[in-house]
Structure formats: structure tokens, C-alpha cells
Amino acid sequence: MKDTFYLRLSALLMALLLNASTLSAVEKEQGMDEMWGEEKLSIQATHPSLKWFTEDKYAMFIHWGLYSQMAGVWNGKTYYGIGEWIMHMAEIPVQEYKDYAKNFNPDQFDAVGLVKLAKAAGMKTIVITAKHHEGFAMFDSQVSDFTITKATPYDRDLMKELADACQAEGMRLGFYYSQNQDWTEPYGGNYKGERPKGYTPDDFNIYFEQKVMPQVAELLTNYGPIALIWFDTPGNMPKEYSARLVDLVQGLQPDCLINSRIGGGYGDYVSLGDMQIPIVRPKVDAWETVDTTNDSWSYAWYDQNWKSPKAICERLVRVVARGGSYMLNVGPKGDGSLPEQAVESLTKSGEWIRAHGEAIYGADASPFDQGFSWGDITTKGQELYLHVFEWPQAGVLRIADLGAKVVQASLLRDASAVDFTQDGSILELNLGSKVGRDLPLISVVKLILDQPAQVTNPATQIDGLTPVTLLAEMATTEGCKHSDYRWMEKFGEWKHDYFIGRWGSEDAVATWDINVLEAGDYLVSIEYSSENDAAGSEWVLSCGDESITFVTFESGFDSTKSFQPGPPRYRNLSVTLGVLNIPNAGLNQLQVTPRLLKGEGIGLKGIRIEPYR
């Protein structure tokens, strides 16, 4: 089974990355939970501080530590991958890594400038790595000598400087703390040295009692009000340790939020997988996506793949439109300065965000479960904000089944009117060809309705004007399975391939509900992967009485090499199937089913439907 094979190997890769011991079959299936915690909490999102969390929408993440000074290089050799994991990747001995701290002197660090940048970027909170897996405290801890104030030439507590700057600028402050992994602590999780004689796994309690609990207490005691503690990689840490941390945080700072990566089913909100921008709305009350300005989390000299200001704004909107919050990371250099490209992207995207804050801050999710080919929607009561990422070639947008009448339509940036007609359930906006050209990023059309939108048909809309891709995430399945295969690529950035596979029989079917606004002919393409034993399978794509029969081919392996050996990945093929006539407007079902099944069939990623002119 291809997806099971992928899941098990992916979980095994996680175990290798974490230097974990042998995993049981169940634990292998739960590899991502060990990395990122559970995405289904055992408590409801009722913490009072979730009000600001769900309203603010946008935060800055900062990965900074000794690894930033190394910048991906150890003993003259570059180690491509997750910059903050260089101790693991280069197999640096514990004492050598600790001794390296004498090279860390961030004399260019400017707490005030950093906070002002976050504010200019439109962010409301800063979360910084107080202690990452390397075990190095970026603050003045009294329970360890491996700290910035004791082990380096830098004799100031930069966390105190940052806390003071945040309070002066009205910025919330949060701390990242690696509660399970500590590579330089003999009793910590995944210690990289030789364990003390007589060590047993129960000795983790020594590390937890003597370092974790007191350091978290220091962070919550010495730096003023803390908005949240961001825990990470709970691994196999017993649940009782997570519970004790929860009690500690609640006892010292009751207003402080805790993310789901504390483990054990605890947490006030869910942190999704790294760099995960969901296609459909997650079924949790409060959640966030964490992302980076380039590919690596910490600074690495080789990573120049900076996200453009437009890309940052689009990803923020997509997250808000699905009901979440977005935390975007930047990795300072070892001297404390920020890469110029990151500063430029954050500043320019911030100009757009602050100018369009009405459509971001305090906004609710789109009334539709997924976005549109042209962009996405955020809402506030009777107001809808259409974020137009790609200006429509014809200058026209169509939306159906809002369940409300449009009273007014205008551009948010200058309040200029937008012509529209609303014939029955179909709203048509005439944007024209020039409106989008004088704004470098995203235009926002504000709609005022006569009542809050009540979408009567949540199916994906085929508007007859723009191409639409029906992704695997959007389908319902019977006799086949959804699978999500994730991997790390060139600089440690997470990628994922979501597909429908494990076709159990020729009765299996994947179904997409579509709301067709204009009947007619559509050009259909399909994206899939296929193992060799599934090559030559025959399939039928149908809509009502109309159908296309096609044969799939072996797709071969993806030649993309990740930074570290991992499971093989099958390449996705994009194939044009032909023209499908959809004779009736309104609710339709598009289905894919095997006609002659070989092996377990294909990994179906998505279907593209394009008006045929």
C-alpha cells in the first residue's frame, strides 16, 4: 500500500531525525504527533486570552541561538537542512558545541528596532526561542551555565531587553521552549552524548525537575506579562509532565496561552504542522499556522529563497480565511542583525497589511469552506472582503449563494464604487481591467450585505470564467482513502502531498460536490502519481450522464533530493483528459472511479476544470 508505506517510512524518518529509540507500530503511525503534538485537543478552546489570539491574527516567530552563529557551517563544511539542527546533522560532540558559545557575541542585536519592525510588518506578537533543542538558554537562567550571560562574551540578558521593548511598543511577547529535547543535557530527551552510568529513561525526571520547570518559571517570573509559551516536539514525553507544565503556567501567569505542542492533548489552541496552509477549514476552534520568510527557520547562509511581500500577504489571507492565525518566522544572524531581504519583505507586506487591516484584524473565516481560484474571503458580520490575488482576465468575478443581498460594493483602499449585479443567487462584480494595476500586491473588494452571509450551497464553485482545481482534500471518499505524505526538502522546509489512494475495489469512488454557475463545455486535466503495478489502470471521470474514460501510467520517482535521506516519493503527472460537457447549472457531482483496477490504483492529487472556449 503506497500511502501506508509512505506513512511508515516518514514516521521512521522522524525517528531518525529525533535520534529516537525503536518505535512500536502505533508510534510509527503517530510520527507527526511526536514532532508537532496532537491536532485534536482534549479540552475546548475556552481560555479568555483566546480573544486577543483570534483577533490579532498575525505574529512574528524568531529562531535564534548558537546555531545562528554557525549559519549552517561546521568545521568548514556546509550542512544543508534545518539550520537549528546543525548539532544533530553535523554530529557535533556535546562539549565542542558548548565550547562554541564563546564565539557567540550578538553585538548588533537591537531589541527596539526588532519590535518596531514587527509592528511595521503588521504583527501583534513576538515569539522567540528562549531555549531550543540545543539546550542553550538565550536568557539569564540561574539553573544552568549554558546561557547567553554565562557562556558567551555577551553579558546582557537580551530577553529582558526584548521584553522591555515589547512593553514600550504595546507588543505581546511569547517564548518558545523545547520541553522534551535537550541535546546537551545528560538526562534530557535525545541527549547527544554518552548517558551517565546507570541511566534509565525514568531519569528524564532529573532534567525536567532541575532544568525545565525552573527555567519555564524564570521565563514567567522575570520578563513581565507573557502572552504565550510555545512548546515543541513533545515526542514520547509522558502526559503527566505536560500536565505539570500546564499547572505551572496557569499558576504563575493565568493569562498566558499554551500551544498544543505541549503534548498529552493539552493546550489552549492547536499549532498545525510546520508551514501547513490548510486548503479546507480545520475542525478545531482555535488554531495557527507557523511559517518562515524563506525555507530555513534559523539563519543559514545558503538559503536565499525569500517569500515576496505578495506571497506573505496571500498566505496570511488564506490562513485568516480558514479561521486561523498566522505566525511568520525570521532568523537573525549570529550577530543579531536581520537579513536585508527579510526586512524588505516584512516591511513591504506590512504596508499592505496595515492599509487593509480592516479585512484582517478581528476578521472571521470565509463563509465558504475553501478559497477561490482568484483569491479568498474574510468576513465581519454583514461585511465581506474579497481578496483578489489574481486579477481576472475578463475583469469579472462571480460568486453564488451568499444567502444575502449586496447593498454596496467598493474597493477597500479608496472606497471607490465597484459595479455589480445580483441576478437570483449569482453575484457578478465588474472590476474592470485597470483597478488592479495600481496596487502592487492584492486588491480588496468590500461588500456590505443586508444580513450576514448564509451560504446555502457550500460546494466548490465553477464560475465559468476562471480555471478551478478540485484538490483531494475537498473530496468525499468511499472504498478509497485520503492520505497526507510529508517530507523535508532542500533546506528543511516541509512539503506535503495530499492525495486519494488505496482504491480497494472497482466500486470505490471519490466525489466532489460542485456548484456550476454556467453550464457548458469544460477542459479537464488530472494530477496523479502511480506505482508500476498500478500502471495501465482504467478510470472514469463523470458528471451526471457525461463521462471521460482514461488510462493512467506509471509516474516514476520524484528526483528531488531532500537534505537528509528519506522515503522515495512518486512523481506527480499532469495529464489533460479532454472536454467534459456539464449540461446543467447548479449543484453537480464530479466523480472518479476505477474501471479496471490494477494494484491499489493511483494517488489522485487533484482535478483541474477550465472553461473550454
Image: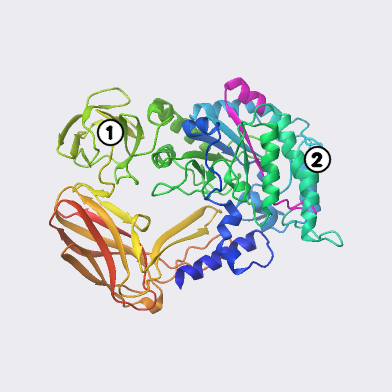
The residue sitting at 26% across, 63% down in the picture is 591
Magenta residues span 163-188
| Residue 316 % position (x, y) | 43, 38
Amino acid under disc 1: Gly
Could you say which disc has been placed on residue 246 in the image?
A: none
Against 440, residue 485 (above or below) is below
Residue 426 or 298: which is nearer the viewer? 426
According to the picture, the residue beneath numbered tag 2 turns out to be 151
| Left or right position of 521 against 598 | left
| Residue 331 % position (x, y) | 59, 41
Circle 1 SS class? helix
Against 94, residue 407 (above or below) is above
Residue 337 or 331: which is nearer the viewer? 331
Looking at the image, which residue sits at the far top?
A: 168
Against 45, residue 381 (above or below) is above
- The first of marks 2 and 1 along the sequence is 2
| Residue 17 % position (x, y) | 63, 60
Please tell me how crowded label 2 is: few (under 14), some (14-19), or many (20+) other residues with Cα within 10 Å: many
According to the picture, the residue beneath numbered tag 1 turns out to be 436
Please tell me how crowded label 1 is: few (under 14), some (14-19), or many (20+) other residues with Cα within 10 Å: some
Looking at the image, which residue sits at the far right?
A: 197
The answer to whether residue 111 shows anywhere in this view is: yes
Specify whether residue 347 is painted magenta.
Answer: no
| Left or right position of 163 against 550 | right
The residue sitting at 39% across, 35% down in the picture is 364
Against 306, residue 337 (above or below) is above
Circle 2 SS class? loop
The answer to whether residue 107 shows anywhere in this view is: no
| Residue 601 % position (x, y) | 36, 73
Residue 280 or 286: which is nearer the viewer? 286
Specify whether residue 181 is painted magenta.
Answer: yes
Amino acid under disc 2: Ala
